[in-house]
Image: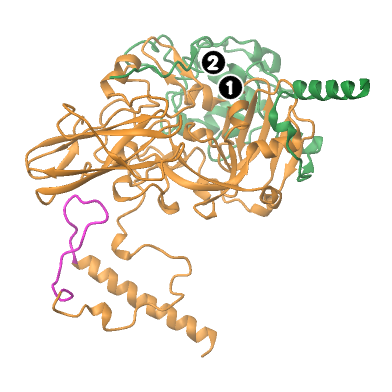
Amino acid sequence: MRRLDLKLALLVSAIAAVGFAAQAEERYGIGQPATQAEIAGWNIDIGRDGSNLPPGSGSVERGRVVFSEQCVACHGDNGQGGIGDRLVGGQGTLASAKPIRTVGSYWPYAPTLFDYIRRAMPQNAPQSLSNEDVYAVSAYILSLNGIVPQDAVLDAKSLAAIKMPNRDGFVSDPRPDVHDH
Amino acid sequence: MSEQTTDKRVREASRRHFLQAGAALAGGSAVAGLGGSGALAESGNNLPPNVPEWMKAPGAPMGSQPYGAPSTYEKGVIKNISKTLPQYISASGRTPLQDLDGIITPNGLFYERHHGGVPTIDPAEHRLMLHGMVDRPLVFTMDDIRRFPSQSRIHFLECSGNPVYTKPYGKTASDLVGLLSCAEWTGVPLKTVLNEAGLQAGAKWIVAEGADAAALTRSIPIEKCLDDAMLVYSQNGERLRPQQGYPLRLLVPGFEGNMNVKWLRRLKVVAEPVYSREETSKYTDPMPDGTAREFTFYMEAKSIITRPSGGQKLTAKGFQEITGIAWSGHGKIKRVEVSVDDGESWQDATLQEPVLTRALTRFRLPWHWDGTPAVIQSRAIDETGYVQPTLAELVAVRGVNSFYHNNAIWPWRIDANGEVSNAQA
């Protein structure tokens, strides 16, 4: 009796700890264990707090060179936009009739700028830039927006410490927001 | 007869057939404004009492189309892709809704949205990695994924920017809401695969990442992952098309299109969203006060009349069937109301069975057009009781720069000549 109670208690606490009914399902034994090396190669997402940012650093000065070589064709000489999104300016326009959404005016977290540039840019050769050059071009775009000084050198710690102008500009979904006729 | 000779005959026969059809197309002229599926001018030679020429000789032999294609007379029914996009790598193409019947979108006409082009993925070298807050991080081959118990379900997919709130509004149903399609999807419930790895306490979100050149990334709430989310490998009975994520995509029914991550390579179980570019700088909904709504997942109830609709023409007074489609990310469509008097009065349309959860529902209303100008429109009501709003109602709350999740009623104007146009354009 005591034993059964103990078993039951263990089972209950195990279910509670996991918290999802799905855990009670049968397992099929399909799939291979993912190795640490496999995970390390693909685990590229960066948290908004800068978690998972790689070692290395990059300067605004180096970023200017990378930008001129890799980015201006789509984003313009000064990040004013073209085939690609506008990256610069627009601060103070979000509540106006013609809001301008850029890295400077809209993007909420600096570390995810690194994330996006590394995973998706340049559009013709994503994941081709070194981590140092991704830091550098992130620093350059932030400097064009007046968010870091022109002599800035960014690494994991300093990138995570930046407070973007629009960090607090997002609200949760309140819909349904339009009611019956 | 050798195989080679047979092949050659097949090729020649199909070439002849193609040339005949092409000549007929070139010689005919489409009825004005009727989109791609317009009838051709009649020569009279094939009409009664004459015997049609296609009865006087054998048709194309078996094997002339190893993978079938529509009639050459339907070659105008294609995806609606703007010729003036700034670029075609991160771009979208629309389903020609006004040319389709029923609720299932043919795979070749399914709408497309890519953020880094369409990758060519060898399924033998594609892997799905499942890691993060799990007991057993796992890697799956496509063979592995197909070994799991499978499931097929019919669901719509809709892009969140379908359409925007500002002019110029589109001319046709496809221009307006053509970033919408519906298919039967086959795959494995995501929760089955998650169970294989074992979720840890505190797992609240799953970051899904594509194997495309954008490595597109979205965070999906765990509740959705354990509800009706699927890992999909087939669409309408055949393997996914490359444009739809071959060999594997995520399906989160009723959620905005970009969350249904294509070419899925990685699922990372986490405690909080990753706040990727796509869920912060891109797919967020700006409001007039300068804030923006984030994590606006659901596509709310919506409908549109597809016939008669913009760009078409009524050719005769009298009976005209009004038909269209309705859908809701929150569940089943309960009712569709149609107005033929510019919103003065509304009547219930008939819903075609089956009426499915988070799927397109076809509606119909018989109508007699008296030849005078009219404004027709539909509004959907879903099983939650939500009523599709007007554009004015949406704009009053969201302004004109909100960009995404515009589910407004779209009225069509029919003039005395029978020409149909966008009444709000």
Does any portion of residue B221 appear in the rendered image?
A: no
Chain holding disc 2: A
**Residue, x 54% and y 25% (percent of image)?**
B277
Residue appearing at x 68%, y 21% in the figure? B271
Chain identity of mark 1: B
Q: Colour of chain A?
A: green
Residue B420 versus residue B36 in the image, above or below: above
Verify whether residue A148 appears in magenta: no
Compared to residue B59, the image places residue B251 above or below, namely: above
- Kindly report the secondary structure that dominates the magenta region of the rendered protein: loop
Of marks 1 and 2, the one in the foreground: 1
Mark 2, Cα crowd under 10 Å, few <14 / some 14-19 / many 20+, is: many
Where disc 2 sits, the SS reads loop
Q: Is residue B334 in view?
A: yes
B32 in magenta: yes
Residue A128 percent across, percent down from the top left? 63, 37
According to the picture, the residue beneath numbered tag 2 turns out to be A108
Q: Which of these two is toward me, B97 or A114?
A: B97
Type of the residue with mark 2: Pro
Front position in the image: B145 or B23: B145
The image quadrant that residue B322 belongs to is top left
Q: Is residue B359 left or right of residue B208?
A: left
- Which sits in the foreground, A42 or B224? B224
User: In the rendered structure, which segment of residues is drawn in magenta?
Assistant: B28-47
Q: Colour of chain B?
A: orange
Badge 1 marks a residue whose secondary structure is: loop
Residue marked by disc 1: B275
Residue B149's x, y, as percent? 67, 48
